[in-house]
Amino acid sequence: MPRYEYRALLACDIARSAGRGERRLQEIRSALRSALAEALGAAALDVRDFTRVDTGDGSLLVAPAGLPKAGLLFPLLPELQSRIRAHNREAGADTRLRVRAAVHAGEIRFDPDGTASGAPFEALARLLDSAPLRHATLAGTGGTPLAAILSQHFYEETVGHGYEGLEADAFTAADVRVKEYAARAWLWYPGSPIGPRAGSGQDSGSGRDPGSGEQPAQPAQPAQPAPSAPRAVEQLVRATGNGTAFAVHRGNQYIRHNDRG
């Protein structure tokens, strides 16, 4: 019999990874994996406790059962941003990183054969592929090192509870519409108040990295939330078209992803 467990999810995707060639792609994939592992460690989280899915030009992390959801935001996001900035300062133009991240949580189906699936994966893929998040990564002269988007549910369960480091004014409301998925979400980007509180040597207040040429991202305009239709749990969750499909089966990962920058 399948079982259902409530899990937090974090997906990261390297913007504009296509066209860099196989060698450069492997370099930036390795850089992202290292940055994620180091950021998790700095946030007192063990990467070995997470189920990690390699999505080709990114990673999907399924958090262990019982992990407080706020731990996927603070200090993890500022720590990850700090490490991406550090990588970019030393990297050439063709190996610099701009990363999109999406965070969600929900009931996941685990089948006896080890397959994990469910509606939360679909919502996560839609958030990662959304226009507000893509636009956020393009802000500034050289693009944003890290821009993240939270589902409404995740926002309410973390930022809405007033946990330390999660100031509500660090997040900007956005209206997400990707194919049939429509929902309110929340953006986090460099320059927001949460960033300088990470204690990672970032600029205080401005969110700008000295010498990087990056300018703070401009906040998205708030929009009215759109209704979201209920979704049934599926054996394989797909975000069709220019999106992502995630599935985990006995340790193997099945991914389809078409990067649009």
Image (cartoon, rainbow, N blue to C red):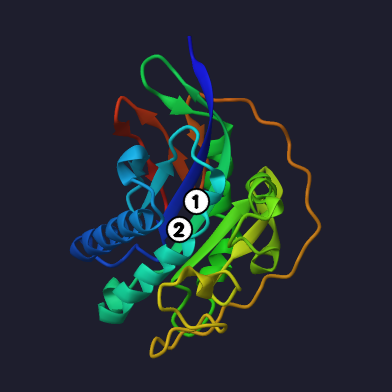
Task: Choose between 12 and 181: the one closer to the eye.
Answer: 12
Query: Which residue lies at the image location 53% right of the left edge and 54% below the top edge?
Result: 129
Quadrant position of residue 34: bottom left
Q: Which residue is mark 2?
A: 76
Q: Residue 32, percent across and down? A: 32, 60
- Cα gap from disc 2 to disc 1, whole angstroms: 6 Å
Looking at the image, the residue that sits furthest to the top is 1
Asked whether, in this view, residue 175 is left or right of residue 111, the answer is: right
Q: Nearer the viewer, residue 116 or 45?
A: 45
Q: Secondary structure at mark 2?
A: helix
Is residue 242 at least partly visible in the picture? Answer: no
Residue type at the position of mark 2:
Leu
- Does the CB distance between marks 2 and 1 fall below 8 Å? yes
- Circle 1: residue type: Leu
- Closest to the observer: 105 or 142? 105
Residue 6 percent coordinates (x, y): 55, 30
Q: Which residue occupies 67% across, 44% down?
A: 153
Q: Is residue 50 above or below residue 186?
A: above
Residue 170, image x, y percentages: 64, 68
User: In terms of image quadrants, where is residue 136?
Assistant: bottom right
* Image: 205 above or below 73: below
In the picture, the disc for residue 72 is 1
Mark 1 lies on a secondary structure that is helix
Q: Residue furthest right?
A: 224
Kindly identify the residue that appears in the image at 32 percent across and 61 percent down: 35
Asked if one can make out residue 239 in the rendered structure from this viewpoint, the answer is yes
Rendered image: mark on residue 45: none
Image point (43%, 68%), residue name = 81
- Say which quadrant the C terminus sits in: bottom left
